[in-house]
Image: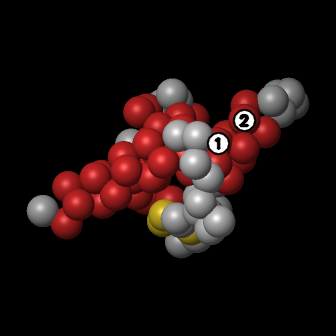
Amino acid sequence: MAKQENVSAVASAAEKASGSATPKREQRFLVSTLRADCVKLFGCTTSTFDGAFFCCADKEYSIEEAKEIIKKWLGKEMKG
């Protein structure tokens, strides 16, 4: 039941982020909460999300901050 409430909170925050009114302070979510809905929120798979947020499991981010982290991570070149 708690997971469903977290999903609702993330969905509400996503709607607010996409609306024209911008709050002064964005709501922040644990990485695990953002990961649970990464396909819906960011359009990326969980494996992409995991790569972008490696070593960030216990931190909190706003949806916009998370989008920027994923965008930046996807832009990195592979070394090999």
* Residue at x 64%, y 42% (from the top left corner): 67
Q: Residue at x 12, y 62 (%)?
A: 1
Q: Amino acid at mark 1?
A: Lys
Between residue 33 and residue 19, name the one nearer to us: 19
Task: Give the class, few, some or many, for how many residues have Cα within 10 Å of label 2's Cα (few <14, many ≥20).
Answer: few
| Residue projecting furthest to the left | 1
- What kind of element bears circle 1? helix
> In x, y percent, where is residue 28?
53, 66
Q: Which mark is residue 41?
A: none
The residue that disc 1 covers is 67
> Would you say residue 49 is visible in this rendering?
no
Front residue (pair 66, 32): 66
Can you give x and y, in whole percent of width and height, for residue 74 in the image? 73, 31
Question: Residue 71 — which label?
Answer: 2
Would you say 66 lies left or right of 35 here? right
Three-letter code, disc 2 = Lys
